[in-house]
Each structure stands twice: as structure tokens, then as C-alpha cells.
Image (cartoon, rainbow, N blue to C red):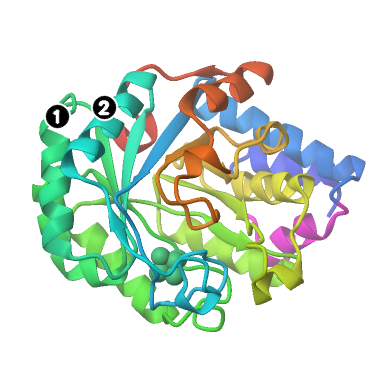
Amino acid sequence: MEIHDIIKKSRNREPFSREEVVAMLALPADSLNSYVLMGEAARISREVSANRAEIHAQLALNLAPCPKDCLFCSFAVANGIFSTSTVASPEDAVRQARQLENDGANALYIMVTANFDLGAYLEMSKEIRRNLRPETVLIANVGDDYASSARALVAAGFRGVYHAIRLREGTDTTISTTRRFESIRMFQDAGLSIGTCVEPVGPEHTNEEVADMIMFTAFLDPSFSGAARRISIPGTAMAARGMISELRMAQIVAVTRLAMPRSVTGNCSHEPGAIPIMGGANLLWAEVGANPRDTAERTETGRGHSVAAVRQLFTETEWRTLDGPSSFFRTR
Ligand code: SF4
């Protein structure tokens, strides 16, 4: 398929076949045609979000070795990075949440490791909710065991959940794709919107695997999709597989945008960078506390970006950022 036929098909809002998505992913990341796709994806992202990018901020309530053993995660017991558990005090969690809200984050994600107690999570989340502005969008980032209590998350004030079937789920993790998919449906059935992503992409993933995941995220009718590359955790077995470049991630971000219906207005990328914005990312992340891609206990001293740093990336790429609550979640 010629590049101009791809652009024409996109502008006609016709869905792409798996073969066409694979062909887009197979372009060399630094080729002219790949840049054309990135340019068109960025144009669509600006169009569907009125040139207002969003900054979503994640706050981790705990740090703990996690028995689910996702091999790309610094919390995995198998990786041996962290051996002790810590939990933020309710006062600290509220203070950090209010800081992120005041910094201008458009949505706030409350993350815990998969083995964190549900009752404690709900209590702390309610305390955070009570101390935020009513319109502030609160999103849960939690394990599959919480899915059967999805209505309790709604009652605690959550608008949505971040959940994904990760690439090679069940092989590089101990969780089955069936379980992850059931959780997503349970969250959605309770009225929670889903944010998701094609992640964590490494050099070993084939174009077919990435294409299948892109199309799966479209099938979920999410508030946003996007793509995130795997960050190597030093000293782990997975680090030996290496990382894809930021440019390759930007290409995948672009193909994800093109393959997604226009009703999905958010297109995320992680970790933040100007190159994925050029590929059509209109959603980037700030992080506070523990971070599954970091070996620092507090990612704000490590890999994590502040809201201001993410805003600067958007400013440098001539985006404006949204003031107020996330439109990606509002429109679902
Ligand atoms: S990604 Fe989540 S479930 Fe997997 S090891 Fe890390 S904290 Fe546990």
C-alpha cells in the first residue's frame, strides 16, 4: 500500500486491516514514509483534542516486592530490586495529590502493587478524594484482584482505571491474558472508563505482536490508547533484551493513533519525550513515589517527570496543555 493511500484511508476514517498496520510498523523508523505517518498522526491528535495536550500524574501509595513477577517491573520479586515494603501515610498521600492537582495535572492516578490490601486502598483513596476538588479526575491503577470490587472503586470516587494486557502477558508475567481481559470488562461493567496502552514494547516484539495489541486496544473502546517502551531495569534478565529507540516508540505511537477510531481522543506515550509527541502523543505522564520502571524508591528523584517538566515538553513542540479535568475521560 502506498503511503498516500494510507493517509487517504485514514482521512476517510476507514479502519485499517491487520496487514496494513503490520506494514506501517515494518517501515524503517527513520524513513521518510515513517515520518509522514508520524506527521499525520500528530495532525490527528491535535485535531481531536483541539490542540490541548494532557498531563496525567501518577501517585504510588506503596512500594513492595510484588509476587506477580512481571519481569519488566522493578517491583517483581524475581528481580530482587526491592526487599522491603513501605506505605505512604494518608497525610503524605493527600499532600502529594493536592500538589499534583495544584501543578495542573488533568487526571490523578492512584497506584499500588498488585498485592496491596484493598480495604487500605479504598480508605486512602477516599481520604485523597475528600481533599481534592470535586471535578478532579481520579483513576485507579491496581491489580486484577480489585476487579471484583470495581463498584467499590466507583463509590470511592474513581472515574476510571488504567489496565492493559501487556505484550507477552503470561510469558513475561504470571498473569494470564484471560484474567487481564476479564478484569477490564469487570471495570467497564461497573461504569469505569479504561485507559490502556501497547506496552512494554521491547526489541524482541514482532510487528505482528504489536499490531495485534494496537487493534486489541481499539476493540476496548478506551479513553486513550498509545504506546510505551520497556525501560531496562539494570541487572535484570530482561535488560539483556535491550530497549527500542525513542524514534521507534514514536513510530508505534503514530501507528496506534492512525489505527484508533477518532472517538478515542487520547494517545499516550511513556516515558515522556519530545520525539513521541512528534509521533502524535497528546498524553504524557508525571510520576511521584515508587515507579515500576525505576530503581529509586521515589521516582521524583530518579526517572519520574514533574508536571512542569512534561508541560515544557509540550510547549517546545508547540502544543498547548489543557486547563482543568481530563477531556479524554470526560468524553467517554
Ligand atoms: S507490573 Fe504490577 S503486577 Fe506486575 S510485578 Fe509490577 S506491580 Fe506486580
In the figure, is residue 126 to the left or right of 94?
left
User: Is residue 135 shown to the viewer in this render?
Assistant: yes
Q: Residue at x 49, y 82 (%)?
A: 170
Which x, y percent locates residue 139? 29, 45
The answer to whether the residues at label 1 and label 2 have Cβ atoms under 8 Å apart is yes
Residue 219 - label: none
Which secondary structure lies at badge 2?
A: helix
Of residues 163 and 306, the one nearer the viewer is: 306
Q: Amino acid at mark 1?
A: Asn
Give the quarter of the figure containing the C terminus: top left
Of residues 331 and 56, the one nearer the viewer is: 56
Residue 131 - label: 1
Span highlighted in magenta in the image: 14-28
In the figure, is residue 32 to the left or right of 195?
right
Give the alpha-carbon distance from disc 1 to disc 2, as whole Å. 7 Å
Q: Callout 1: few (<14), some (14-19), or many (20+) C-alpha neighbours within 10 Å?
A: few
Quadrant position of residue 234: bottom right
User: Is residue 325 shown to the viewer in this render?
Assistant: no
Of residues 258 and 122, the one nearer the viewer is: 122
Residue 98 - label: 2
Q: Residue at x 51, y 35 (%)?
A: 283
Dividing the image into four quarters, tell me where ligand 1 lies.
bottom left
Give the quarter of the figure containing the N terminus: bottom right
Of residues 93 and 185, the one nearer the viewer is: 93
Q: Amino acid at mark 2?
A: Arg
